[in-house]
Amino acid sequence: MVKKQKGSIHAGLFLLVTILIVLAAVVITAGRFWWLPPLASEHGAWTDRLFVVTLLITGIVFVLVQIALAYFVFRHRDDPERRAAYFHDNKPLEITWTLVPAVIMTLLIVSGGRLWSRIHQSPPEGAYEVEVWGEQFKWALRYPGKDGQFGRTDIRLINDTNPLGIDTKDPASKDDIFFPAGEGELHLPVGEPVVVRLRSKDVLHSFYVPAFRVKQDAVPGMVIKTWFVPTKEGEFELVCAELCGLGHYQMRGIVIVEPMEKVQEWLSQQQTVMDVIP
Ligand SMILES: [Cu+2]
């Protein structure tokens, strides 16, 4: 009799604690207490939609599975007067629990794939371009200047005054505007397609602006383009999302989104390569 009581207490506690954990998880998620920052890009809306749909489907499965688990643990709690039943397999049950998740996963993967190709389609012609360089543990920037062309760069030309190795003999370089790591702000036009050319001077970094839902690796030796349309004016945080060394946590930058005229005005006040590199 004592053993039976003990089994009931354990099973009852398990039932209670599991239901409390499920409830807490649902309240925290549905209440959006630890949610993404407010959305500030066009692409981000598509990403968020898929994120919410995935969370909803996996959330419903999570709740059902945990409640079923708690119920079965309680229902079949230890009872010395009861023997466990045994059966070898159950085909219909196994087919069901294989097919249902397979169909749901396939649908999610297909929508994810379609979203991926939508985000990674080529940017429109004439989009606003800027270059962002990762460097342990800061971001350097380069704007193409009035001609809209980035000049050539060469690692052999890197020195204290020329941290990006810009080739000053290239005519396209002369009006480029650059900021050594940690010194500039990333000014972007609101409502216009923006192409970010990502580069790295040392290790892997990852350009991540949470408000834009944009995250793209920067790889040494490569120029990787990513593009998006900022939809809100304001200041946003740029962080590195690739563990790039001891100072990774402090690798931050500021993104300023404002009307195109203001961006142009700000750019026209900056020194060009011609002014800075003798
Ligand atoms: Cu980094």
Image (cartoon, helix red, strand yellow):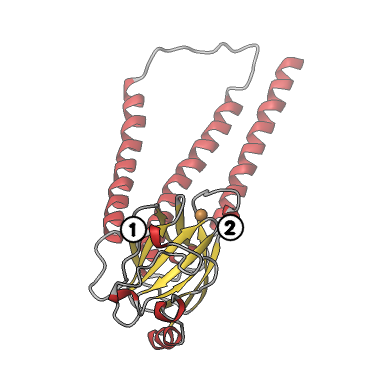
Q: Nearer the viewer, residue 144 or 233?
A: 144
Depicted 153 relative to depicted 109: above or below: below
Q: Nearer the viewer, mark 1 or mark 2?
A: 1
In which quarter of the view is residue 225 placed? bottom left
For the C terminus, the quadrant is bottom left
Q: Residue furthest front?
A: 278
Rendered residue at 36%/31% (across/down): 97
Q: What amino acid does circle 1 point to?
A: Ile
Distance of label 1 from label 2 (alpha carbons)? 31 Å
For the N terminus, the quadrant is top right
Q: Earlier in the sequence, mark 1 or mark 2?
A: 2
Question: SS at mark 2?
Answer: loop
> Residue 34 bears which disc, if any?
2
In which quarter of the view is residue 199 placed? bottom left
> How many other residues sit within 10 Å of disc 1, few (<14), some (14-19) or many (≥20)?
some
> Residue 224 bears which disc, if any?
1
Q: Are marks 1 and 2 in contact (CB under 8 Å)?
A: no
> How many other residues sit within 10 Å of disc 2, few (<14), some (14-19) or many (≥20)?
few
Q: Residue 16 in the image: state x and y as whole percent.
A: 66, 37
